[in-house]
Image (cartoon, helix red, strand yellow):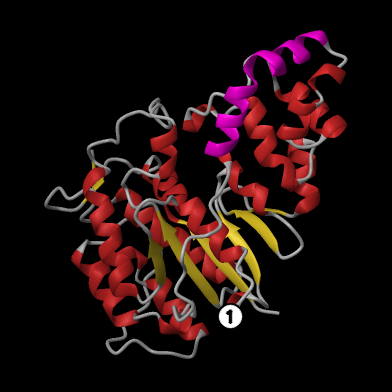
Amino acid sequence: MKRIFVVDCYSILFRTYYTAENMKTSIDIPIGGVFGFIRTIFNLIEKHKVEEMVITLDSGKKTFRSEIYEAYKANRVETPQNMIPQFAILQEFLDCSGLANIKKDGFEADDIIASIVTKKQGKFSQGKFSIVTSDKDLMQLVCENVNCVDIFKDKVFETNDVIEKFGIEPRFVVDYLSLLGDASDNIPGVKGCGAKGAVKLIKEFGTLEEIIANAEKIPNGKLKDAIQNYSQMGILSKQLASLNYDVEIDDSLNFSIGNIHFEEITKFLEKYEMKSLIYLPQRLAKRLNKNSEQPQEEVKEKPHAQFQLI
């Protein structure tokens, strides 16, 4: 059965940016995040022998979550100045690369990912999926046909791994986040309910709704008071933490990496002085028995001389 890799783009981009935030070209164009993203993607393809992949992106516009809770993600620090121009550079790479990528106004990448891996028709009906992310929110999607891959930790999360991490089954991760909250997205959760309390309540009663309905039966006085006093914040938090499974996905989009435009990628890497990465598409082209129209001499990975690390 084929496996489709679904990439959480900005999860990788920001992680790689902070490892090379001052990397620039000879004319001071910041490229560290994009450089790291491209290297990570090609290493992912090589390590996991990827045949089908789609890259998902946030649109950068407000979503339904901001409409129901203005403070959603309001605690996040301002995007670094060196990062801002790299969004357009990354999109330029994706547009020229031949790699399938999806962005939808009004939705986050997480919603696109959820919609892809839960589709029951067309080419999605027979597939297995690997979600490439460091985002714990997406672990709610793990099941028999879906796992999560943290490429930076070299870890694949199957159902048993999620249970080991959280103490609950993947289907309850959204309830766990609803109770505990999520500081990274400014999801409030239920005040007074910690991680251990959340796991205990879920194991005893089930979903957030079932916990609220059985609040009188909660033996722990502090947890009982927390649920009774802050249940509405829990309900709001679940709305924020829940994924939208109904994003329209074009079934004709080709996820095959056999469509990669090796010549265009080489031109892009040369344009932005990332010549030390040229060996990556060359290596992939060789594996796919393809040749770039303008094959380059194989380059070993090393920092390019024109990079300015300031």
Tell me the kind of residue under disc 1: Gly
Q: Position of residue 281 (x, y in %)?
A: 40, 75
Classify the position of the C terminus by image quarter: top left
Instruction: Name the magenta segment's main secondary structure.
Output: helix
Residue underneath mark 1: 122
Picture quarter containing residue 115?
bottom right
Classify the position of the N terminus by image quarter: bottom right
Q: Position of residue 45 (x, y in %)?
A: 53, 69
Q: Position of residue 66 (x, y in %)?
A: 39, 36
In the image, residue 243 sits, relative to residue 124, either above or below, namely above
In the image, residue 197 sits, relative to residue 51, either above or below, namely above
Q: Residues within 10 Å of mark 1 (few under 14, many from 20)?
A: few
Depth order, front residue of 166/152: 166
Give the SS element for disc 1.
helix
Q: Which residues are magenta?
A: 221-240
Q: Does residue 223 show up magenta in the picture? A: yes
Picture quarter containing residue 36?
bottom left
